[in-house]
Image: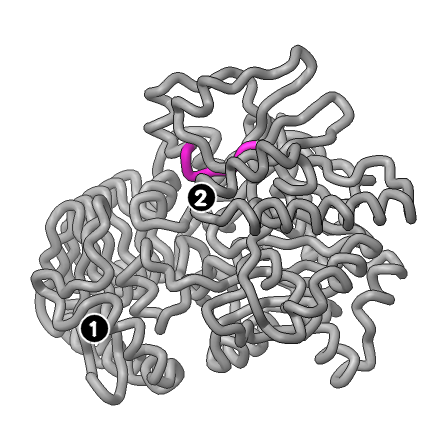
Amino acid sequence: MLSEHLQNIQSLSYGMDIIIVSVTSSHEEVFWQKRLDQMRGQIVKDNALIITVVEDWKNGAGNALGTFYAFTKANELAQKKYHVDLIEKLKANGSIAIYHTAGKGTRLTPMTGCEYNSKSRIKLIGRLWRKNYSTPITLLEAVIKQTSILAPHRKGRLSVFWGDQLFIPSESLKDTTHEIDLLVKPIEHRPTEQEWLENGYSKYGFVIVNPNGEMKQLEKLSYQDFSNLSLKNDEKLAFSLGSFSLSERILSDFLKLFSTELDQKSDSFDSDPHLWMPLSLEKKLYSSILKSKGATLEFAQSHFDRLFNFKTSFNKKFTPKTLLGTSSMGAETLWWDYGNMQSYYENCLKLVEKSPEADALKQFFSIPLKNENRITSSQLEIENSILINCSIHKGKIKNCVLINVTADEINSDSSVLINTSAQSIEANGSILYNALENGKILIDSNQVRADNFSEENGHIKLFNTIHPHLPWDQPVEGNPLSFKDLHQFNQQTNPVQGQQLAQTMHNKIKQAVFDLQK
């Protein structure tokens, strides 16, 4: 019998009626509009309305104002181009989702640099089809695919997701009646300090949930702060998965509340400290937490009063069952974070483990049982590895995942190779991403190599370590420029031209390899 995880994966639909993607540049706006249109029936349903918008907000709006700004821009575009009003769609029980792709992706450099500053374009071990050829699935597409399972339970709501983590519920999903609903993973036992450190729990927000599903939002906690928490007998702790949904009526009131900021593109508000915490905590506690994070006491108190008055007015007007509540994904929810290099590496290699989680990953990414590879001799030994769309003549590949890799010879162990072409490759405990060499690639354990292409600079090879991550603003050994300089350079680069140059160079290497194999 299939586990609940596998049943949930099987029930993935291409469900949201309207998809809004919030990006940071006009290049990304064009790319994602075209790409998602091509993926209808695979990532989004055939008749979904897809809208991409640029967050042109100096210094960033934060994920709270950024959500309201993306919705406002998308609604203006939908009315003008498609004669569709998104608020009316919500009132008519439509499901709408916003996917945020903002951020420099510093923890994934140089792969983000290879993708022209786009974390959402980073490729995973899985594939989609474009006409008659396959293409690796991107991080954003994986997130859209995964969150489609919520569509039947989020009718009449705006759902908000982030573009670097996946989660597969371990429970059957339910509809929500909360005006504001946060996705959470319950904590069934108090983690030890070792578990806390090993799993990086201090990076995640926490919520206290009462039996009615009502919640109090807490900040990210150190283990010491966590161990000092005292709960009532009927209260439970849960991790916040960071994603939330809003009813149409509270969304409309939020848009009115922040209309000045949205018109002026001023301030920067995030959902946890500037929405959920003042709506769920007492004033003294909230002010103390915000002050410890660098805000002035005057701002903390005035912002609390603003949200408290908002809550009071809303409750009088609508008398909701629950203003701020949670939906449990289940304590055994599978949670795959691809937001940093170490977790990216570890989650890619989970595919070759012998475990129920690996089975779930393979099913989610539609890993084919019989890989379609070009293996031209019996001189290639493959042990416990996944190869997709690869052409390799000889060597030994053990505990690896490869997609779109071409080489005459590969000797590799515990490595991730994506879109890489070379005459020979030696890689152990490492990542090769969009790398090419008219000769041999040799990469050491714990190393990452990702290549950038542009008409201005041609072919640049960039290196980093899986853990710890190297400095953002200082050139490191082997790199011609810092990651910060690369980010600034990419802002002036046309990604389409760079990708065309990369494809031309990859094709030349592939032909040279094929000639060797004749």
Q: Amino acid at mark 1?
A: Phe
Residue located farthest toward the top when viewing the structure as drawn: 233
Q: Position of residue 495 (x, y in %)?
A: 38, 81
Circle 1 residue? 514
Q: Amino acid at mark 2?
A: Lys
- Between circles 2 and 1, the one closer to the viewer is 2
State which quadrant residue 68 falls in.
bottom right
The image shows residue 78 at horizontal and vertical percentages of 75, 77
Is disc 2 placed on a helix, strand or loop?
A: loop
Q: N-terminal of the two: label 2 or label 1?
A: 2
The answer to whether the residue labelled 2 contacts the one labelled 1, judged by CB atoms less than 8 Å apart, is: no
Q: Residue at x 37, y 56 (%)?
A: 388
In space, the residues marked 2 and 1 are separated at their CA atoms by 58 Å
| Quarter assignment of residue 394 | bottom left
Which residue, given by chain and number where applicable, does mark 2 sit on? 293
**Residue 345 point in image, percent of width and height:** 31, 46
